Amino acid sequence: MSNLFPTNRDLFFPQLFDQTFDSFFSKMNHPSADIVEKENCFEVKMDIPGMKKEDIHVTFNQNVLTVEANQRHEVENKDESSNFIHRERTSRSFRRQFAMNNVKSDAIECKYEDGVLNITLPKMKQETIENSHRIEIQ
């Protein structure tokens, strides 16, 4: 029945192009991330190929780890009179957030190498957690 009444998306983006379009952009909108909990820390590994270290921003605020990146690229081919024959601009960006409890925020380590971002978030000691969150009722 859906083939009888195509949507605007079907009219403008044929099936073959639609698959290529989705697969190309979806990976940058949500790059792959693995989070592993170990005894003393959490480890986050995120695949961000083709980005420069300067374009990636990592923050930890109110128990939320935020990884965001923004990259712009321009290509120009000009003739001698400076009239544009060909000009392209691309922009890639993403933002991922993860709630992480019991993290010792002043000891977080982050490294970007070969397109992979590695973040180590040390856990607070159990005694510190219990003492800092316990409120006696009177």
Image: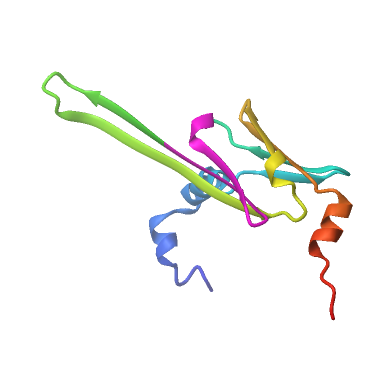
Q: In this view, which residue lies farthest toward the left?
A: 81
Give the number of callouts: 0
Determine the image quadrant of residue 91: top left
Residue stretch rendered in magenta on the structure: 51-71
Q: In this view, which residue lies farthest toward the bottom?
A: 138
Q: In this view, which residue lies farthest toward the top?
A: 80
In front of the other: 29 or 21: 29
The reply to whether the magenta stretch includes residue 60 is yes
Q: Position of residue 64 (x, y in %)?
A: 65, 54
In the image: residue 49, left or right of residue 91: right
Residue at the (43%, 67%) spot, across then down: 7
Q: Position of residue 103 (x, y in %)?
A: 75, 49
Residue at the (88%, 44%) spot, across then down: 39
Determine the image quadrant of residue 109: top right
In the image: residue 132, left or right of residue 96: right
Q: Is residue 50 above or below residue 30?
A: above
Residue at the (52%, 47%) spot, across then down: 94
In front of the other: 1 or 61: 61
Magenta-highlighted stretch: main secondary structure?
A: strand
In the image: residue 23, left or right of residue 4: right
The reply to whether the magenta stretch includes residue 62 is yes
Coloration mode: rainbow
Residue at the (84%, 81%) spot, across then down: 138
Q: Position of residue 80 (x, y in %)?
A: 14, 18
Q: Position of residue 13 (x, y in %)?
A: 42, 54
In front of the other: 62 or 39: 62
